[in-house]
Image: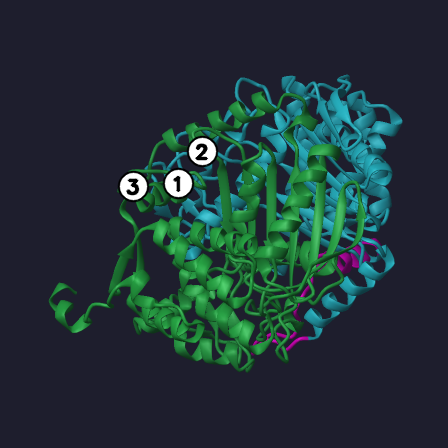
Chain colours: A green, B cyan
Amino acid sequence: MEASQIYSAELLNRFCNRAFEKFGFSKDESEIITDVLLLSDLYGIESHGMQRLIRYHKGIEKGMIKVAAKAETIFETPVSAVIDGHDGMGQLISYAAMETAIAKAKTSGMATVTVRNSNHFGIAGYYAKMASDQGLIGLAMTNSEAIMVPTYGRLAMLGSNPIAIAAPAKPYPFLFDASTTVVTRGKLEIYNKQEQALPMGWALDAKGHDTTDAADVLKNIVGKKGGGIMPLGGSEEISGSHKGYGFGMICELFCSILSMGLTSNHTHLNNKGGTCHGFIAINPGIFGDAQGIEEHFSTFLQELRDSDKAQGQTRIYTHGEKEVEAYQDRIQNGIPVLKNTLHEIQELCNYLNIDFQEYFGRIEDETKHKSFY
Amino acid sequence: MEASQIYSAELLNRFCNRAFEKFGFSKDESEIITDVLLLSDLYGIESHGMQRLIRYHKGIEKGMIKVAAKAETIFETPVSAVIDGHDGMGQLISYAAMETAIAKAKTSGMATVTVRNSNHFGIAGYYAKMASDQGLIGLAMTNSEAIMVPTYGRLAMLGSNPIAIAAPAKPYPFLFDASTTVVTRGKLEIYNKQEQALPMGWALDAKGHDTTDAADVLKNIVGKKGGGIMPLGGSEEISGSHKGYGFGMICELFCSILSMGLTSNHTHLNNKGGTCHGFIAINPGIFGDAQGIEEHFSTFLQELRDSDKAQGQTRIYTHGEKEVEAYQDRIQNGIPVLKNTLHEIQELCNYLNIDFQEYFGRIEDETKHKSFY
């Protein structure tokens, strides 16, 4: 357990808005970016929340993320749009793209919007949920820096390539959001910090052999020296490696292929992000009784939760359930921010000329607390 | 290696057409069913080809499959349709449903067709490929008899729930078709026949424990006694079990939920199939330059095939490549039919009053060939 300090969502919200305005984003833009980041923290997905601030800062500094960029719709029909993000902030491009998909789905029944020349957009689930919040089915996908090694390969050629889908249901929407790799790079970073051996089947070394050495894999990914993370299903066809690789290809198709953008293996080279996204919205009304469909789905989800558990297990989760529980807990009890992240934010505050202590107080001396860990 | 005899695709085609006409299907209907079955054999997916004849026969005998049923469109918009199959033959309902999706996508840009009250439809890839053969992107999904145990459960609640996607590319279309379970029931049947232990993480026994006993799992599935096959990603979240379960849920959503049909856990009870399907067709022209998109995709697929191989591996496959190679081989050299299947076909011929030997000659005495195995 890493040391952390707890802050209210309201305070983190105020801080993030201030920071993004200082970067040069408008008030409205800062609110959108902050909302995406904080939903991730509220859902307990720290890897895509406040922790990312420093990486966005670096992206802006290097010119990979252009603060003033305006996304441009370069082709559209009543059921589709192709958007060029012109290297802007991923959250802003993606929020607008999903709004477009939703508006078109409300008019035409369903719509697909594909995006090129964007940047990291946070959690895919945020955009899928935008649709389900309005009674629609939403899908969101993104490619990324190459990290997934195709089955029987030894070079990372696809991204973590998450696919998220949300659909209205009671007591809360169905929300599935998962990378198509067996794990994300963030998980490898945690194993590395804790000097823990990776489970077999997660990653390959530079020569294409199964490895348990997280540090080596991460170093090779950054240096593009070979190796990487395996698809969902591991390294062999016997455990379904080709299936995870195939789901990663579906993501690539809707993101980089349909947008004529950069495939994962060509992104993040020479200070160019080039990330691509795909968004789909479907109005369940085009199948007749939207209300009846929501009830039918809610019944099935409840049957899943109620069905017999494996010995030693007490719950079967449906997708989105853990996120809702984390959200309720963190709205009430606050969000833990890792001290490591606080130190990064402190440096960011110096850079942006923001009074760190006004928001975060003092970072408590970790040595004082050693006995707790 | 099980004993088999080899027949030409042309002969098997003639035989299947004759058999389905004898069951009472029209000439046109018999051609569609045969085409779906034989593509599976030509692709080397024997589990969904000729081997299935006996199961379709049983389904028709029991009244689960109604030969005379006519599918009915019960709701539609320019981008959607809901079809009630009225318990007809899955291939006929699905062929018509995908034709509807394709026609609507040609007019409206994209379309989703969802189907309830159908039966086993063969390989999902057949229908996805119908779209890519006409320059569109096609998706096909189906639920099935419950066989997938949700993460931390011990009862099968979802089907094998395959998702297939096809998209135009050169030198051959991209075609991904995979169950969202780690393996299919057919694979368990092969392990059982060969009295081989299952790899850990494939299946659960009736109490929800990992098991390697294929016979026990199959017996429990049929008897609905608990246990079943794990999602892609195995039995634990650490290997991504919740992801395979989530992809299975996407399939269920487009099949049984949007059609207001039976979810997998309610199908195949009391002589009622109730299988549901989902079909999506997307015209790449709605993203601008369909030809350019196909070339862009073909380039990425070639980059994947050309990328460095893991040590000991000679090829990285893209999805659909193995199927095309199997097809070319089998069109030229014929299709092996297992002797076990031939014996079943012989019985079927007696039932349908077809001269078995006219098509298949004699089943050679296996004892004579023992030395070959």
Amino acid on which disc 1 is placed = Val
Q: Is residue A48 visible?
A: no
Measured in 3D between alpha carbons, the distance from the residue under mark 3 to the one under mark 1, in whole angstroms, is 20 Å
Percent x, y for residue B139?
71, 43
| Residue at point 56%, 67% (across, down) | A148
Amino acid on which disc 2 is placed = Tyr
Provide the residue designation for mark 1.
Answer: A324
Please, is residue A287 above or below residue B150 in the view? above
- Callout count: 3
Provide the residue designation for mark 2.
Answer: A172
Measured in 3D between alpha carbons, the distance from the residue under mark 2 to the one under mark 1, in whole angstroms, is 8 Å
The verdict on a common chain for dots 2 and 3 is yes
* Image marks 2 and 1: residues in contact by CB distance under 8 Å: yes
Q: Nearer the viewer, mark 2 or mark 3?
A: 2
**Which residue range is magenta in the image?**
B307-331
* Of callouts 2 and 3, the N-terminal one: 2
Graded by Cα atoms within 10 Å as few (under 14), some (14 to 19) or many (20 or more), the crowding at tag 3 reads few
Please, is residue A86 above or below residue B109 in the view? below
The verdict on a common chain for dots 2 and 1 is yes
Q: Determine whether, in the image, residue A281 is placed left or right of residue B185.
A: right
